[in-house]
């Protein structure tokens, strides 16, 4: 078992990650980014999130060090950089994003 101070630090880190994941737009953005790198216009089109909200949510994800941006000409491309966020998203996708008939066949 970890010492209490390490457990508290890990709990704080996990709480911050879950806080970042707690907004539906940020969660769907991360789900899309778990599939690879996308530019802002692609994200806007695929997810039907309007540009002002998209920029705000991507800014929060960058601030929390969950995604990274790179510029290519006039386009900004985003990708997930957090292994912890990616692991959580993969679990969520397996549990929640599978078509209903596939889930019922697993049991």
Image: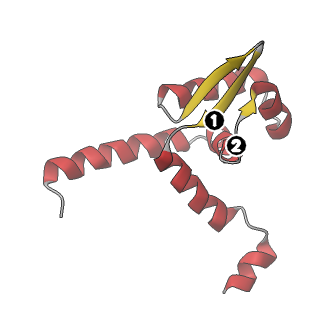
- The residue carrying pointer 2 sits among few (fewer than 14), some (14 to 19) or many (20 or more) residues within 10 Å by Cα, namely few
How many residues crowd around disc 1 within 10 Å: few (fewer than 14), some, or many (20 or more)?
Answer: many
- In contact (CB < 8 Å): disc 1 and disc 2: yes
**Which disc is residue 106 wearing?**
none
State the residue at coordinates (62%, 38%): 26
Image spot of residue 102 (x, y percent): 77, 77
Q: Residue 95, located in which quarter of the rendered image?
A: bottom right
Is disc 2 placed on a helix, strand or loop?
loop
First of labels 1, 2 by sequence position: 2
Colour pattern of the rendering: secondary structure
Q: Does residue 9 appear left or right of residue 86 in this picture?
A: left
With respect to residue 16, does 87 lie above or below?
below
Mark number for residue 36?
A: 2
**Would residue 55 appear left or right of 4 to someone viewing this image?**
right
Quadrant in which the C terminus appears: bottom right
Residue at which label 1 appears: 79
């Amino acid at each position: 078992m970890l010492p209490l101070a390490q457990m508290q630090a890990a709990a704080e880190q996990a709480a911050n990650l879950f806080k970042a994941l707690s907004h539906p737009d940020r969660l769907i953005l991360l789900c899309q980014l778990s599939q690879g790198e996308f530019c802002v216009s692609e994200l806007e089109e695929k997810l039907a999130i309007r540009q002002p909200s998209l920029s705000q949510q991507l800014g929060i994800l960058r601030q929390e060090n969950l995604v990274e941006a790179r510029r290519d000409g006039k386009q900004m491309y985003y990708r997930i950089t957090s292994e912890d966020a990616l692991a959580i998203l993969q679990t969520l996708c397996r549990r929640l994003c599978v078509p209903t008939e596939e889930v019922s066949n697993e049991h």
